[in-house]
Image: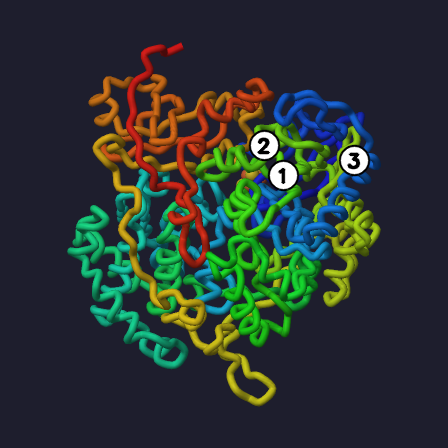
């Protein structure tokens, strides 16, 4: 069988794969590419199921136009040309009448390297209202890194045999980044200690030398206690901090409010364990620290991530081999940032970015941070815009659609984004997407889901096997290319083709093929996309920008950091300028369990058999995980007369859902953890919307803007409250 070399895009690990084709040229099997420099032949269950995923009979093949009411499920087939003509005419009319800001775009889980061209489409139109899942994902972490170090965040570089300590904070790499988890295990076997901080027991906590289990939503207090101990016990790297950082005295004063005993009261983690963690992290160096998606922390998201980035700076683990490393943008290869046309949006339009007046890091903040970063990072304009900053705030978009405040959003484009399932308080998304004031909802996706079901026009998307690929995120240490494995089935088009064909109708200039864009990105490296793709090693390593702050500028002075002060900002000048507290702090939970809803409700954990809300439609993966699962401590279950596998009603002040009890020893009797959207096999039309209100925990949480992080807008995912009961009807 012939095999085509490509890149699995079912999560951001982007493993190298070999896709075997049968005699008819159809994908028959996927194996790991042993020559790939990072994945080295590894393939997780999602990757192994990639053929089933590709072959899913529910995948869309032709464009559809709504015939009945939104969500009614009556469609007519339409040609791409007619669909795009109709969409373009409407967008131009709206843009003319209400300004381009009345058009918004959100993307979700990306299925290849061309997923960010929607931002270019919107920016070229003159709308600042694009964004999406990045805000729900690593956004707060990148924002914290930008505020502290002047670019993204300092990433862990675990080196087995060298790294002495690994800290995994609120992260589940065994499911979300399996290769990183394998590296951590290798480091442990070579003598490294593993510290895990997680409110839930996980595979990682079971392997940990030390597990800290804070109450949900209190992680920021714990992180501040570690900062306090590091300072108090003389564990600060005086040379680095004295030369390169500012704000240590103010930080020390703030952190002193969180001695271990107080942190123990706030978090439930014994003071002795907090001390042990500080000693392991700051006393056994090099130590590598990574964190998951801190969005669940709501108002404390940035507080937590700022404290973690600061810990890296204080302890001498920054830019130390085996510790954490700051990847800057790659000077020798372009990326989505190169072509996102961010700078083409006029300043008066940028000021209209939805959510940016309230969550000011997305407005004036991105301008301040980008200007400073540009000085250090090769003069690249707006190097830190994508994913983390300079994006619109999705719940603010929904709010604007429903209320018309601050202005009416009249058209929304969604790409690979099941918004109805994704956001906490997803009733707000449903309300917005069904509001008649939203005159046009266009979805480009792989299949019908609760969100595309509400669209006016649904366009069939090509999956990663159906398009050429170049993974160049704008930072990191590898640029990788992948072949298109097969021609798109039916009338599916790639993200690039969708954006190009719509953009041209809007009067925009777009290169003919995505390969032309990739050629342009590669030009400084002297390679072409085709040449790189067909070479023995179809990737480029990034240049090593280690310790860039020490490199000299043309006047012979060290470059320093890409922050306004040129230093590591323990106390942030940008946050101060925006009117926020420049230091990390801790706000007590806004959603304390109450007598009526006495349990913490954690939401949205990661699994190896499902990427976010995806993969439930793949039979081999569904067999591993047939029903939505409520993680519950056996002691709590016994108190409610719940047996393993029972259906449990989970009720909040916003409604109730049902999931099956999965016993999770050591979870704690004050909390449960529930999953997101389920049931791709249920009825599509409303009110079912593929089972959206039946089992999706986001359907019974809220997205009150007051509960979001005040500077960044991170969502309050994991800090709701609920009560539970065994369902009387177990059918
Ligand atoms: S889904 Fe699995 S195989 Fe695919 S990129 Fe992610 S870790 Fe690799």
The residue indicated by pointer 2 is 434
Q: Disc 1 marks which residue? A: 438
- Dividing the picture into quadrants, the one containing residue 594 is top left
Drawn side of residue 160 relative to residue 201, left or right: right
Q: Secondary structure at mark 3?
A: helix
Q: CA distance from mark 2 to mark 1?
A: 7 Å
Q: Position of residue 124 (x, y in %)?
A: 72, 57
Dot 2: within a 10 Å radius of its alpha carbon, few (fewer than 14), some, or many (20 or more) residues? some
Q: Is mark 2 within 8 Å of ligand 1?
A: no
Identify the mark at residue 581; answer none if there is no mark: none
Q: Distance from label 3 to label 1 (Cα)?
A: 18 Å
Which mark is in front, 3 or 1? Answer: 1
Residue 387 percent coordinates (x, y): 56, 54
Name the residue rendered at 75%, 55% in the picture. 518
Helix, strand or loop at label 1? It is loop
Task: Judge from the rendering whether residue 82 lies leftward or rightward of residue 472; answer left or right.
Answer: right
Mark 2–mark 3 distance (CA, rounded to whole Å): 20 Å
Q: Residue furthest bottom?
A: 555
Q: Nearer the viewer, residue 619 or 309?
A: 309
The residue to which callout 3 is attached is 83
Circle 2/circle 1 CB separation < 8 Å: yes
Q: Is residue 387 left or right of residue 308?
A: right
Residue at 26% x, 47% y is 212
């Amino acid at each position: 069988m012939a095999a085509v070399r490509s890149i699995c895009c079912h999560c951001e690990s982007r493993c190298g794969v070999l896709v075997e084709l049968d005699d008819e040229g159809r994908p028959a099997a996927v194996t790991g590419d042993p020559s790939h420099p990072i994945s080295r032949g590894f393939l997780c269950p999602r990757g192994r199921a990639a053929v089933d995923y590709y072959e899913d009979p529910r995948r869309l093949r032709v464009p559809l136009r709504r015939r009945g009411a939104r969500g009614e499920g009556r469609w007519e087939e339409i040609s791409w040309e007619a669909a795009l003509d109709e969409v373009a005419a409407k967008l131009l009319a709206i843009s003319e009448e209400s300004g381009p800001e009345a058009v918004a775009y959100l993307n979700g889980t990306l299925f290849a390297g061309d997923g960010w061209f929607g931002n270019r489409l919107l920016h070229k139109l003159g709308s600042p209202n694009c964004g999406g899942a990045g805000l729900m994902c690593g956004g707060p972490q990148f924002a914290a890194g930008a505020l502290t170090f002047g670019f993204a965040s300092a990433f862990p570089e675990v080196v087995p045999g060298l790294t002495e300590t690994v800290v995994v904070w609120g992260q589940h790499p065994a499911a979300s980044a399996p290769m990183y988890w394998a590296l951590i295990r290798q480091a442990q076997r070579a003598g490294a200690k593993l510290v895990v901080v997680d409110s839930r027991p996980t595979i990682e906590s079971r392997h940990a030398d030390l597990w800290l289990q804070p109450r949900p939503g209190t992680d920021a207090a714990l992180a501040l206690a570690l900062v306090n101990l590091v300072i108090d016990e003389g564990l600060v790297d005086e040379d680095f901090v004295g030369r390169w950082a500012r704000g240590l005295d103010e930080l020390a004063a703030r952190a002193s409010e969180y001695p271990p005993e107080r942190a123990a009261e706030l978090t439930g983690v014994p003071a002795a364990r907090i001390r042990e963690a500080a000693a392991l992290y700051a006393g056994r160096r090099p130590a590598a620290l990574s964190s998951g998606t801190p969005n669940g922390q709501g108002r404390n998201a940035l507080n937590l991530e700022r404290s973690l980035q600061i810990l890296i700076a204080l302890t001498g683990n920054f830019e130390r081999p085996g510790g954490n490393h700051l990847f800057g943008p790659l000077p020798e290869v372009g990326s989505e940032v190169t072509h996102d046309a961010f700078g083409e949006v006029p300043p008066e339009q940028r000021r209209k970015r939805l959510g940016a007046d309230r969550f000011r890091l997305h407005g004036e903040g991105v301008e301040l941070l980008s200007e400073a970063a540009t000085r250090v990072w090769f003069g690249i304009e707006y190097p830190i815009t994508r994913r983390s900053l300079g994006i619109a705030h999705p719940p603010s978009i929904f709010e604007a659609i429903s209320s018309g405040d601050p202005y009416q959003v009249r058209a929304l484009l969604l790409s690979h984004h099941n918004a109805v399932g994704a956001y906490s308080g997803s009733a707000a998304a449903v309300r917005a997407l069904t509001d008649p004031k939203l005159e046009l909802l266009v979805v480009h996706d792989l299949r019908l889901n609760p969100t595309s079901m509400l669209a006016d026009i649904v366009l069939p998307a090509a999956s990663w096997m159906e398009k050429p690929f170049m993974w160049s995120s704008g930072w990191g240490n590898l640029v990788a290319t992948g072949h298109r494995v097969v021609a798109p089935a039916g009338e599916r088009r790639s993200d690039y083709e969708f954006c190009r064909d719509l953009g041209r109708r809007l009067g925009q200039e777009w290169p003919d093929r995505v390969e032309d864009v990739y050629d342009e990105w590669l030009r400084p490296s002297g390679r072409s996309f085709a040449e790189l793709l067909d070479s023995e090693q179809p990737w480029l390593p990034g240049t090593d920008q280690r310790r860039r702050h020490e490199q000299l500028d043309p006047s012979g002075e060290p470059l320093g950091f890409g922050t306004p002060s040129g230093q590591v900002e323990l106390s942030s000048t940008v946050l101060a300028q925006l009117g926020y507290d420049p230091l990390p702090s801790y706000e007590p939970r806004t959603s304390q369990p109450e007598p009526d809803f006495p349990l913490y409700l954690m939401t949205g954990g990661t699994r190896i058999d499902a990427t976010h809300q995806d993969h439930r439609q793949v039979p081999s993966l569904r067999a591993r995980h047939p029903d939505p699962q409520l993680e519950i401590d056996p002691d709590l279950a016994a108190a409610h007369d719940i047996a393993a596998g029972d259906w449990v009603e989970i009720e909040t002040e916003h409604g109730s859902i049902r999931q099956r009890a999965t016993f999770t020893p050591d979870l704690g009797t004050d909390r449960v953890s529930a999953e997101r959207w389920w049931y791709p096999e249920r009825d599509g039309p409303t009110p079912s919307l593929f089972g959206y209100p039946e089992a999706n925990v986001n359907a019974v949480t809220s997205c009150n803007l007051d509960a979001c992080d005040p500077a960044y807008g991170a969502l309050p995912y994991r800090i709701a409250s609920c009560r539970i009961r065994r369902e009387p009807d177990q059918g």
